Amino acid sequence: MELVAAGHRLEAAWYGPPPERAPTLVFLHEGLGSLSAWKEFPERVADACGMGALVYSRWGYGKSDPRAAPWPLSYMHVEGLSTLRQVLDAAGVRDAVLVGHSDGGSIALLFAGSGLPQAQRVRSLVLLAPHVFVEDVSVSSIAATADAYRTGDLRERLERHHGANVDGAFWGWNRAWLDPGFRTWNIEEYLPRVRVPSLVIQGRDDPYGTLAQVDAIERGAGAPVTRLVLDACAHSPHRDQPDAVVDAIRRFVSK
């Protein structure tokens, strides 16, 4: 399956019932993620919730059209305020639960808090380790990934998911976050316009963010926020604690 949004071809997959038969879980991957990097998680959540699932790789990731580094520091704003609505239109999504991991969670918040008419199709948000501002711990950990990419096996592991896009995906994301101008990146101003319920799931051992992110969302959002903080869990709750995460999402959307 392919979609075209913002003039770029995006690889995509659909699981479960079509949008005219059930709400759709829309999976928005992390800064180094892709369609394939989610593995079986989207299909598992779709089955548990009785919903459809749309999964896609953003421009420059996976098997989507290539995108060279550097990226603009506003890349998440562009995705959340422009590209995502085009993706939903192209896929025919009418009633959405946005499931965003890390950068994907930030993109989900930007879209839901955009005030755009198209955002009214969103019924709720599931946010896995999202960011609403930049923390020192995030910058330190992202700097360490650059060393792992250059000297370790990180590039090889990411290449399995991104193929020829691997260098553009990694350096586009990495250099944006490490740019001194990115330290002021902050999307808290969008939170009051998020008027749908949110489930925020954070690992207590996350090296890329702290509970301050969850606190900020809970404090600023314009609708109820349910928080779930998981022990023995780092930056990818759906990989570190998959059973707990699937069950939490199922219970949340069933309300």
Image (tube, helix red, strand yellow):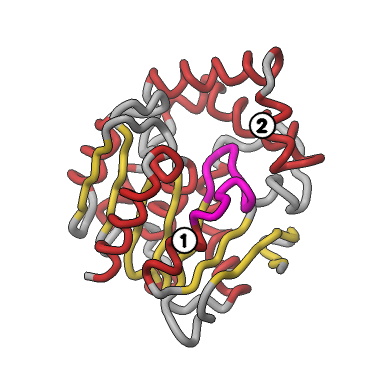
Q: Tell which residue pokes out farthest to the bottom in this image.
A: 20
Question: Could you tell me if residue 139 is visible in this image?
Answer: yes
The numbered disc on residue 44 is 1
Start-end of magenta stretch: 29-41
Q: Tell which residue pokes out farthest to the front in this image.
A: 243
Q: Is residue 247 left or right of residue 69?
A: left
Q: Amino acid at mark 2?
A: Phe
Q: Is residue 174 above or below residue 98?
A: above
Q: Is residue 218 left or right of residue 208?
A: left
Instruction: Classify residue 194 by image quadrant.
Output: bottom left
Q: Amino acid at mark 1?
A: Arg
Check disc 1 and report its element: helix, strand or loop. Answer: helix
Of residues 180 and 227, the one nearer the viewer is 227
The numbered disc on residue 170 is 2
Question: Could you tell me if residue 130 is visible in this image?
Answer: no
Quadrant containing the C terminus in the rendered view: bottom left
